[in-house]
Image: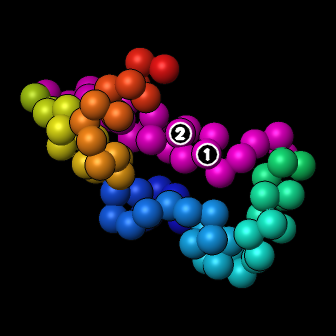
């Protein structure tokens, strides 16, 4: 769900939970039981996609940021460095 909607619509706990037919709190508990969170999963998907996009010749940071769902290229740069 995260990968399919990244850069198209906001990835929120409520939306992911609804797509999985779960309540938001139930999804949080299940992710916590697996030792992760929605934020961590989102960061993993973004990092993997950014790695693929930036490996291609001539990608522009602004376009990559947009494709990853960042509203600001600066936020993407900071996340990438982190």
The residue range painted magenta reads: 34-57
Name the residue beneath numbered marker 1: 39
Question: Which residue is at a point 45% across and 36% down the rendered structure image?
Answer: 48
Q: How far across and down, in percent of the image, does residue 16 sit?
A: 61, 68
On screen, 2 above or below 60? below
For the residue pair 5 and 81, the one nearer the viewer reads as 81
Q: Is residue 76 left or right of residue 34?
A: left
Snapshot colouring? rainbow
In the image, residue 51 lies in the stretch drawn in magenta: yes
Is there CB contact under 8 Å for labels 1 and 2? yes
Q: Residue at x 63, y 71 (%)?
A: 14
Look at mark 2 in the image and give the residue it sits on.
43
**Prevalent SS, magenta region:** helix
Q: Is residue 22 above or below residue 35?
A: below
Give the CA separation, mark 1 to mark 2.
Answer: 6 Å
Tell whether 8 sits left or right of 37: left
Rendering quarter of residue 28: bottom right
């Amino acid at each position: 769900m995260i990968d399919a909607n990244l850069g198209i619509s906001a990835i929120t706990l409520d939306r992911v939970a609804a797509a999985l037919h779960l309540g938001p709190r139930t999804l949080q508990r299940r992710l916590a039981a697996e030792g992760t969170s929605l934020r961590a999963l989102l960061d993993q998907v973004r990092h993997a996609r950014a790695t693929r996009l930036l490996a291609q010749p001539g990608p522009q940071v602004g376009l990559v940021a947009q494709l990853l769902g960042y509203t600001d290229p600066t936020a993407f740069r900071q996340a990438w460095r982190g």
